[in-house]
């Protein structure tokens, strides 16, 4: 007679779970499942609350680093959860090259004889300095790399970049602090000017001080306090990674170092963060998908050859016709039919309005996102901002411009002119710190320098 197969074949007689153990397992599974569901629901509620315009108290308290009632939760929000609120990489939280710059710029003892400085001087006629926001930032980035490498001799130690306290042209009439870059931005260092050796009061024969006569002048690296020349230009560092301990340029990306130094410069003060945040909430839809968004930062006005704007820098570009911008937008749409949005900004109101009308007529299904409330001062130069738009302050112009920069960080495809430092900066920052992946750029006003290459294709 054939034996019947045992239901426990291949299993030890002692391995059969008892009824009580099965009950315990079921209870554990139910408990874990409930915990996961509660966590997901709570996170969704918290995120919705934090991203809602109603999250903040009626008292007007909008401390962005420590929001009322839930400071720790705010810190845990990912970048994507800030789609229509202020986000900028924090050196303390973000780390990486940005964090390394922060560490080097903020020493434990600024007064130590071994702490060396590179003082960024204002020009002798600084009130009429026409550089715009990103031209200043680009200079700061280059001076920063000079300081960090001590002009390609990191073995001699690094320097702390610190700016002087002369008038910053765009900060005239500042109501939020001094009329320096610190009206808008966090200090470059925790060190003070009182920590440096002052060339105006020092012994003329002092070996502690050196004032450069030109950006690339050689100097004794043992000098404690080095001052920039009066030029708007700067020394080009050959090996920007040498100070990090990570090796040399050939092993790393130029764009990441450049973007990190710009991100460090553009850390805004709390009042300006609040202003930009309010504008982003007003302008960026909560359902915006950066992967399906085109950015069109139109730079015209004083950038164009033959302009008649008094007090602005001379023109540098045969500005492309608006039809060229439209053509490239259409090419992006052909390439990626999933595109839904286009962000359009410009300091030139007439050009912006004209392009918006063209978009409405030619591409009516495309959702257009504008910088509502943008001053559109009609110039990118920084010395007389208040004179171009009646009733507007320098602070409003700067807040408008930086809002445009933040808005474009939420785009993937760009139509721009790399001849403009402004639009090139937008592309560089979007590539490294933006909300979308695989950034692609159409450059319809190309420049040939390294920064333009970084903007156009992401590498030098």
Image: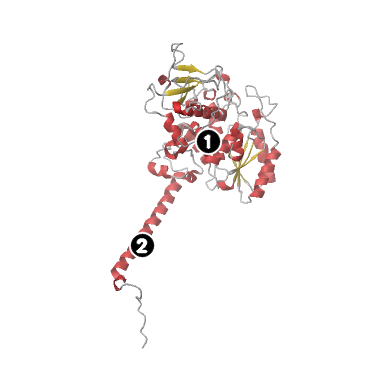
Residue farthest toward the bottom in the current orientation of the protein: 1
Say if mark 2 contacts mark 1, CB within 8 Å: no
Badge number at residue 29 = 2
Badge number at residue 249 = 1
**Quadrant (top left/top right/bottom left/bottom right) for the N terminus:** bottom left
Badge number at residue 198 = none
**Quadrant (top left/top right/bottom left/bottom right) for the C terminus:** top right
Instruction: Examine the rendering and report whether any part of residue 252 can be seen.
Output: no
> Which callout, 2 or 1, points at the residue further toward the start of the chain?
2
Residue 406 location in percent, x, y?
Answer: 54, 38
Residues 51 and 182: in front is 182
Residue 215 location in percent, x, y?
Answer: 55, 22
Q: Secondary structure at mark 2?
A: helix
Of the residues tagged 2 and 1, which is closer to the observer?
1
The answer to whether residue 84 is left or right of residue 22 is right
Residue located 61% across and 25% down the image? 388
Q: Is residue 60 above or below residue 132?
A: below
Residue located 63% across and 50% down the image? 336
Residue 245 image-quadrant placement: top left
Residue 268 location in percent, x, y?
Answer: 48, 32
Query: How far, Cα to Cα, is label 2 from label 1?
Result: 52 Å
Residue located 52% across and 18% down the image? 212
Q: Is residue 326 above or below residue 226?
A: below
Residue 403 location in percent, x, y?
Answer: 54, 36
């Amino acid at each position: 007679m054939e034996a019947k197969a045992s239901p426990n074949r291949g299993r030890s007689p002692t391995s059969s779970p008892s009824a009580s153990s099965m009950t315990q397992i079921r209870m554990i599974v139910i408990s874990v499942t409930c915990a996961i569901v509660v966590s997901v629901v709570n996170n969704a509620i918290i995120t919705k609350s934090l991203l809602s315009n109603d999250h903040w108290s009626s008292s007007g308290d909008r401390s962005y680093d420590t929001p009322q009632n839930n400071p720790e939760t705010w810190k845990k929000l990912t970048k994507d959860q800030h789609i229509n609120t202020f986000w900028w990489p924090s050196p303390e939280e973000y780390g990486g090259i940005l964090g390394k710059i922060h560490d080097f710029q903020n020493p434990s003892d600024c007064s130590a004889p071994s702490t060396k400085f590179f003082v960024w001087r204002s020009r002798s006629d600084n009130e009429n300095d026409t550089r715009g926001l990103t031209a200043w930032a680009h200079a700061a980035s280059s001076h920063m790399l000079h300081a960090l490498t001590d002009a390609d001799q990191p073995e001699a130690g690094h320097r702390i970049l610190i700016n002087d306290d002369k008038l910053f042209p765009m900060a005239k009439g500042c109501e939020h602090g001094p009329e320096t870059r610190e009206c808008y931005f966090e200090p470059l260092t925790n060190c003070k000017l009182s920590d440096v050796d002052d060339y105006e009061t020092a012994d003329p024969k002092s070996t502690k001080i050196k004032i450069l006569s030109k950006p690339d002048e050689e100097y004794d690296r043992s000098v404690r306090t080095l001052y920039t020349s009066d030029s708007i230009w700067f020394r080009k560092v050959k090996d920007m990674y040498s100070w990090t301990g990570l090796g040399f340029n050939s092993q790393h990306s130029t764009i990441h170092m450049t973007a990190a130094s710009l991100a460090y410069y553009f850390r805004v003060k709390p009042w300006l963060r609040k202003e930009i945040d309010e504008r982003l909430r007003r302008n960026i839809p909560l359902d915006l998908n950066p992967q399906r968004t085109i950015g069109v930062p139109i730079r015209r006005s004083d950038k164009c050859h033959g302009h008649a704007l008094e007090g602005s820098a001379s023109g540098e570009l045969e500005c492309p016709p608006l039809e060229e911008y439209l053509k490239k937008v259409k090419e992006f749409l052909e390439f990626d039919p999933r595109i839904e949005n286009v962000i359009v900004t410009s300091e030139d109101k007439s050009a912006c309005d004209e392009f918006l009308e063209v978009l409405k007529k030619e591409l009516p299904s495309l959702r257009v996102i504008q910088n509502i409330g943008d001053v559109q001062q009609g110039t990118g130069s920084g010395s007389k901002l208040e004179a171009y738009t009646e009733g507007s302050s320098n602070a409003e112009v700067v807040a408008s411009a930086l809002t445009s920069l933040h808005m474009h960080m939420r785009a993937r495809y760009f139509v721009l002119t790399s001849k403009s430092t402004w639009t090139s900066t937008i592309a560089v920052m979007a590539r490294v710190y933006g909300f979308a992946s695989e950034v692609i750029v159409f450059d319809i006003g190309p420049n040939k320098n390294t920064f333009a290459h970084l903007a156009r294709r992401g590498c030098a």
